[in-house]
Amino acid sequence: MIKKCKLFTFVLFLFMPSLFANTFFTGYAGGKLNFSIVENSEKYSPKINFQGFIKGQFNFSENVWSHCELSLDADNLISESFLHGIDSKVRVDELSVIVKKQFERKTNFFGTFIGALDPIGTDIFLKRYFAIDAIASKLTESWLGLEGSLLYPHLGIGVSDVLRFNRKPMAAGIYLYANKDENDNNFINVDLRYACVYRYFTFDVACGLGIPTQFNNTFVQMMKESCLHAGLTTHIGNNYTNSLFLQMGMFNAPIASFASKQILSDTYFLIEPRFKFGDIRIHLSAYSLPQKTVDKLFFVDNSMGASVNLYSDAITFFPRRSTMGIFASYSFPNKSVVELKDIKNIADWESEIIVIPYFSTGFLNGEIHVQTKINFMKFDASNWYDAFTVDLGFKTSL
């Protein structure tokens, strides 16, 4: 779904509300500048990367609405080619139309979509159908909207049907969509989903099968070339108590790999005990995540590791409610759960220690976020500045 597009595609979305004069529009947008040093440079060479997103909901009527989200990832804004063009990617993360039908005991939501609809690994499904507060881990925060935090996406072109029960806090859905894998092979996917939300327990699970449209004749061969994907999100407790947050699953694991340990390379997990002491919160995390997801996250640089996030979101600053915290991690580049079988040699693994003090507060009609990342493994007497990066971000409602 990734295409290199001209920047006007991103800007066009800013003017979409005026194209639908009789609709009601809500949305928000955000952007982040990352200040760092060009790696492996013989001299001091700064760079500034940009990530941003814009998303909105168009309500055409009480029972029909549309979601649209675009994200932009731009390389060095101050490179020598700045005046001639910047390498950037504009992605359509979601373009969907939802039709609601109300019944006495249930509500049906039928949708058509392009991109990623209600991806697991985020709390979007839970917020849309149960109107709960955010429960996703800060560890998976991103400034690329949906695309940045995907662990297991319903990514492609297709249809969905979700049934929410009016008398019980439950919902179930089915997704049928077509997409391509990294080798440009076509797949038809069928996914099932179930979620429930109680006061001290939240549960969201999805699983599905991707069937190749081309295979070598036999049914057995078709099944061997098919891929399984599954994801689970659980929150025991809630945002106002001590709690346990858990995510796990696998992404497009070939059925043939179940006979070997290769399936472990397609598996991810995130376990996060959360503690609350008055206005102070402490989140302890252990994780093994897809590298493609990690590359777009805000706090995490490597695919496997452990972290602690100490913060308070109840600070008053001129006189806005603010968040201040410090994130520290010990992680291993290019590692996954597969390597855990060799954990006795963990002392020989390449590792990184990263500390990130951060601060966010209300500013104008939005929120500004500032953080400094310090990678202690990159300290060098001659190139000490390689160890530091600075991020400045801003989000606002539209």
Image: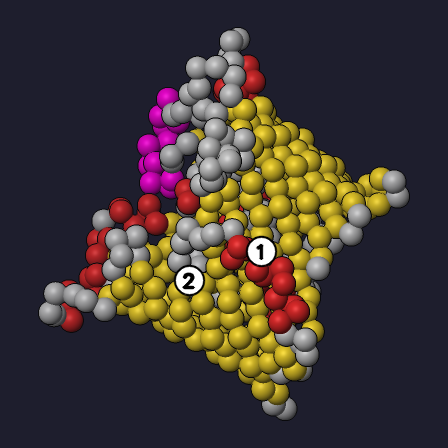
Q: Which residues are magenta?
A: 336-348
Q: Tell me which residue sits at (65%, 68%) in the image.
A: 17
Q: Tell me which residue sits at (63%, 63%) in the image.
A: 15
344 in the magenta segment: yes
Residue lying farthest to the bottom in this orientation = 104
Tally the numbered discs. 2
| 260 relative position to 393: left or right | left
Q: What secondary structure is found at the residue carrying circle 1?
A: helix
Figure check: 295 above or below 104: above
Q: Residue 11 bears which disc, if any?
A: 1
Q: Are marks 2 and 1 in contact (CB under 8 Å)?
A: no
Quadrant containing the N terminus in the rendered view: bottom left
Give the crowd class for mark 1: few <14, some 14-19, many >=20 residues within 10 Å. Answer: few
Q: Earlier in the sequence, mark 2 or mark 1?
A: 1
Q: Nearer the viewer, residue 297 or 126?
A: 297
Disc 2 versus disc 1: distance between alpha carbons? 23 Å
Magenta stretch: dominant secondary structure: helix
In the rendered image, residue 60, in percent from the top left (x then y), is placed at 63, 79
371 in the magenta segment: no
